[in-house]
Amino acid sequence: PFKGAKQYRTLWVRIRFIRRMERDIMERGRSRESVVRQYLESVKPMHDLFVENSKRYADIIIPHGGRNSVAVNLLIAKIESVLAGHPEPIHPPQPNNSFCG
């Protein structure tokens, strides 16, 4: 039931870009302009075409790079359930539509 599940974790574009910029400047000795140019001309278009597009194949999408405690806790609960031998589906809470104000 859970074996082979595909997950997709999102991460804010700014954070991805900042991490890339820091790494390329510090570890690879590249200039800021070089990093920005490569990001705009190659990295971002390829990310949009291949990585972002792969989201549709995911069984679960965890927003905010895994820092989403609700999504992570649901995933942990499901793993624990499967390990305990109770692979019943875990359903997220349903919205309460009784508020009419």
Image: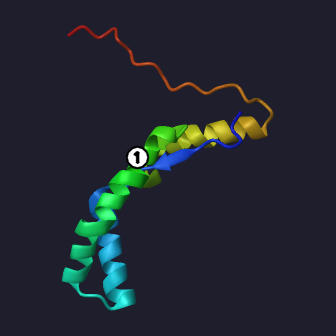
Quarter holding the N terminus is top right
Image color mode? rainbow
| Residue for badge 1 | 53
Q: Which quadrant would the C terminus be assigned to in this image?
A: top left
Secondary structure type for disc 1: helix
Asked if residue 85 can be seen in this view, the reply is yes
Q: Nearer the viewer, residue 32 or 92?
A: 32
Q: Quadrant of residue 34?
A: bottom left
Crowd rating for badge 1 (residues with CA inside 10 Å; few <14, some 14–19, many 20+)? few
Q: Is residue 92 above or below residue 41?
A: above
Q: Give the left or right position of residue 42, taking residue 79 as reference.
A: left
* Amino acid type assigned to the residue bearing label 1 in the image: Asn
Q: Position of residue 30 (x, y in %)?
A: 29, 88
Work out whether 42 lies above or below 48: below
Name the residue located 51 percent from the left edge and 40 percent from the top edge. Answer: 57
- Where residue 21 appears, x then y in whole percent? 30, 76
Q: Residue at x 40, y 46 (%)?
A: 53
| Residue 77 in picture, x, y percent from top left | 63, 38
Q: Residue at x 51, y 26 (%)?
A: 92
Extreme-right residue of the structure = 85
Q: Residue at x 52, y 39 (%)?
A: 60
Q: Is residue 12 above or below residue 75?
A: below
Q: Is residue 11 left or right of residue 38?
A: right
